[in-house]
Image (cartoon, rainbow, N blue to C red):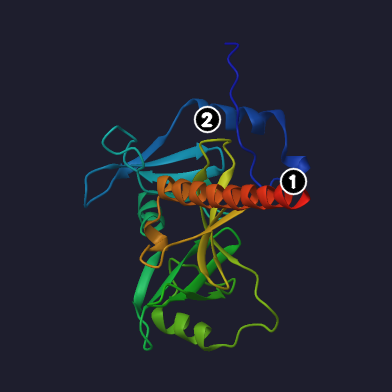
Amino acid sequence: DGNTVNVNLPDELSPDQLTPEFLRELAEQKASGPTELGKDPDSGEPVLLLNGRYGWFVQLGEASDDNPKPKRQSLPRGMSPDDVDLDLALKLLSLPRDLGAHPEGGRVITTYGPHGPYVAHAKEDGKRDFRSLPKEKTPLDVTFDEAMELLRQPKKRGRAAAQALREIGPHPADGEPIQLLDGRYGPYVKHGKINASLPKDQDPDKLTLEQAVELLAAKAAKGSSKRGKGRSRSKKKGS
């Protein structure tokens, strides 16, 4: 009909799979809109399967003025949207899973991150201790005992890189993703070259896109102020 439909190609797609038939199927899926998998038994809200800018995801309820940010969960790498039914979608939407209380305080949780599935000790001071899940385990089936066994194992030597927790969403200014990470000094958000730490009383799992944007804006303004003062001192010194 002459209309253009933009689709996202799966990361694991090989060149030989990029056929006209495959592209046509993707375009038809995108044009048809969300697929309703069923109803959430607790809320009665529809459980939807959608294909967005960053790939396939499941969503609880329609976006509306009363519910502008419905709960979403991206499909893990390698999971086909054809394999997602209501039961699996509800399990994905239940993430992160709280497996139980850690003996040293805090909680043991598990979920998918940008770099794969993991378990974590979410400590009472806001810091987290991470371990990647082995290939045969997922956040949907790992048990508390299995998670504790992983957490007891020593971390690999060397300074650990910041652990990416999740992608919060696109920044309204440029559409680039805002990431939530856990670094050496605790959780923080990252957009481009700007990093902003989360307040100690902020639960990383409940951080919204709006809160992340506010933290980044405050950090950017603080950085600009410091640079401005530096330039003023330089000019005064040279006069």
Q: Where is residue 236 in the image (x, y as percent from the top left)?
A: 70, 49
Q: Residue at x 69, y 48 (%)?
A: 231
Q: What amino acid is labelled 1 in the image?
A: Ser
Left or right of 151, for residue 207: left
Q: Residue at x 52, y 61 (%)?
A: 188
Reply above or below: 88 against 64: below
Give the residue pinned by disc 2: 30
User: Which mark is first along the chain, 1 or 2?
Assistant: 1
Give the residue pinned by disc 1: 14
Q: Residue furthest front?
A: 239
Q: Position of residue 108 (x, y in %)?
A: 40, 76
Is residue 95 visible in the rendered structure shown here?
A: no
Q: Position of residue 149 (x, y in %)?
A: 49, 86
Quarter of the image where one finds residue 36: top left
Q: What element carries label 1?
A: loop
Which dot marks residue 126?
Answer: none
Reply above or below: 189 against 28: below
Q: Residue at x 43, y 41 (%)?
A: 49
Left or right of 81, for residue 160: right
Reply above or below: 104 against 71: below
Q: Which of 217 and 238 is in front in this view?
A: 238
Left or right of 224, for residue 149: left
Q: Which residue is drawn at 40% across and 80% down?
A: 144
Q: Which of 157 and 73 is in front in this view?
A: 157
Q: Where is residue 165 in the image (x, y as percent from the top left)?
A: 52, 62
Q: What amino acid is labelled 2 in the image?
A: Lys
Q: Which of 6 and 157 is in front in this view?
A: 157
Q: Is mark 2 on a helix, strand or loop?
A: helix
